[in-house]
Image (tube, rainbow, N blue to C red):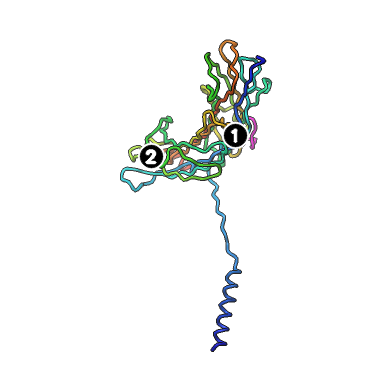
């Protein structure tokens, strides 16, 4: 009887080890769905070529910010990019600031996006692009601020905000 | 001019983004009479932003009343958040866009200077042609 018990016990132990040795499938699940991702690609900096002027133009010592839009599927979204019309942070300013700016395509991941700048729509400080091709598009935003009538900007930190929007169509 | 010290910051920070899905949500019945709900997913890949605002808008981007657990959502970097949004059934035809907007600190040290807004379009608000095209 003891022998039978021993064999039974051994069989259970071997079975348990065998069970432990069975590989388990661990699934990794992912969905490809239409989506838009807005990336801040390049840091922007205002240059100060004259006392009354702040500019992101390279010739003025600035750096134009680059915003990247990634769309997984074509024709699902439009991009709206607005250059700033006010400072979010600045020293106290007693005179008016005149804002100008523009948005243009800097790089594309697909040559079919080459027509984006031709077909863009501009109104107020906003530029609208139909994202008709799947992939990534880099948009350069230029911004310039002039203070008063050739008045010098007070010393301090100046910060402005670009708005990048991705709207489902 | 020579004493002028300007710390000129326009943008700073790392490459960053945020995601708001699905692109075309639908309204479903909720456990409350006269209220419908939908579920949105937020994924924060913006290292410079921790808070996002939810908006429900009509076709002209005007706000519509809605309810959610937090109108300002705290979603740290690389975290996902599921957001349930509730509106009145009577507002179904008006509610066209559901948006998430990154909230920037006005004078924070993060240097965030790009405000990103991603808007999904409610499926019933699409035309018949749009729905067929999917």
**Does residue B12 appear in the picture of this structure?**
yes
Name the secondary structure under disc 1: strand
Q: Residue at x 64, y 34 (%)?
A: A108
Q: Does the segment drawn in magenta span residue A107?
A: yes
**Crowding at mark 1 (Cα within 10 Å: few <14, some 14-19, many 20+):** many
A28 shown above or below B70: below
Side (left or right) of B81 relative to A143: left
Question: Can you tell which quarter of the image residue A116 is in?
Answer: top right
> Which percent across, then down, holds residue A16?
57, 73
Residue drawn at point x = 50 percent, y = 37 percent: B51
Q: Chain of mark 1?
A: A
State yes or no: residue B75 in magenta. no
Which label sits on residue B67? 2
Viewer-nearest residue: A25 or A131: A25
Q: Position of residue A80 (x, y in %)?
A: 53, 30
Residue, disc 1: A40
Residue A47, percent across and down?
65, 21
User: Which numbered tag is attached to residue B115?
Assistant: none
Q: Quadrant of the N terminus of chain B?
A: top right
Q: Quick one: A45 or A125, which is closer to the camera?
A: A45
Q: Which residues are magenta?
A: A106-111
Give yes or no for contact between labels 1 and 2 (Cβ–Cβ under 8 Å).
Answer: no
Label 1 to label 2, Cα distance in Å?
Answer: 30 Å
Element on which disc 2 rests: strand
Residue at point 34%, 48% (across, down): B31
Residue shown at 65%/23% (left/top)?
A62
The local crowd at label 2, few if under 14, some if 14 to 19, many if 20 or more residues have their Cα within 10 Å, is some
Which residue lies most toward the bottom here? A1
Q: Chain of mark 2?
A: B
Residue A100's x, y, as percent?
A: 57, 19
């Amino acid at each position: 009887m003891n022998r039978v018990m021993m064999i039974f016990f051994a069989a259970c132990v071997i079975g348990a080890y065998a069970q432990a040795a069975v590989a388990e499938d661990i699934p990794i699940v992912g969905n490809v769905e239409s989506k838009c991702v807005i990336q801040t690609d390049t840091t922007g900096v205002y240059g100060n070529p004259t006392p009354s002027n702040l500019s992101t133009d390279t010739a003025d010592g600035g750096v134009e910010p680059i915003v990247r839009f990634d769309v997984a599927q074509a024709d699902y979204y439009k991009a709206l990019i607005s250059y700033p019309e006010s400072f979010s942070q600045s020293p106290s300013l007693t005179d008016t600031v005149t804002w100008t700016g523009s948005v243009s395509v800097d790089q594309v991941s697909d040559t079919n996006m080459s027509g984006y700048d031709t077909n863009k729509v501009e109104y107020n400080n906003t530029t609208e692009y139909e994202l008709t091709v799947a992939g990534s598009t880099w948009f350069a935003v230029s911004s310039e601020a002039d203070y008063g009538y050739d008045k010098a900007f007070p010393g301090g930190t100046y910060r402005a905000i670009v708005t990048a929007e991705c709207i489902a169509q | 001019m020579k004493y002028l010290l300007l710390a000129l910051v326009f943008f700073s920070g790392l490459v960053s983004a945020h995601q708001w899905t699905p692109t075309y949500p639908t309204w479903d019945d909720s456990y409350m009479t006269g209220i419908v709900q939908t579920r949105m997913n937020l994924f924060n890949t913006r290292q410079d932003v921790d808070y996002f605002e939810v908006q429900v808008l009509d076709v002209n981007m005007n706000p519509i009343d809605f309810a959610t657990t937090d109108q300002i959502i705290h979603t740290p970097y690389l975290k996902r958040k599921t957001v349930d949004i509730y509106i009145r059934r009577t507002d179904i035809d008006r509610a066209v866009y559901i948006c998430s907007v990154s909230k920037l600190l006005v004078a924070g040290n993060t240097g965030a200077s790009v405000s990103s807004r991603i808007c999904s379009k409610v499926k019933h608000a699409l035309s018949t042609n749009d729905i067929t095209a999917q």
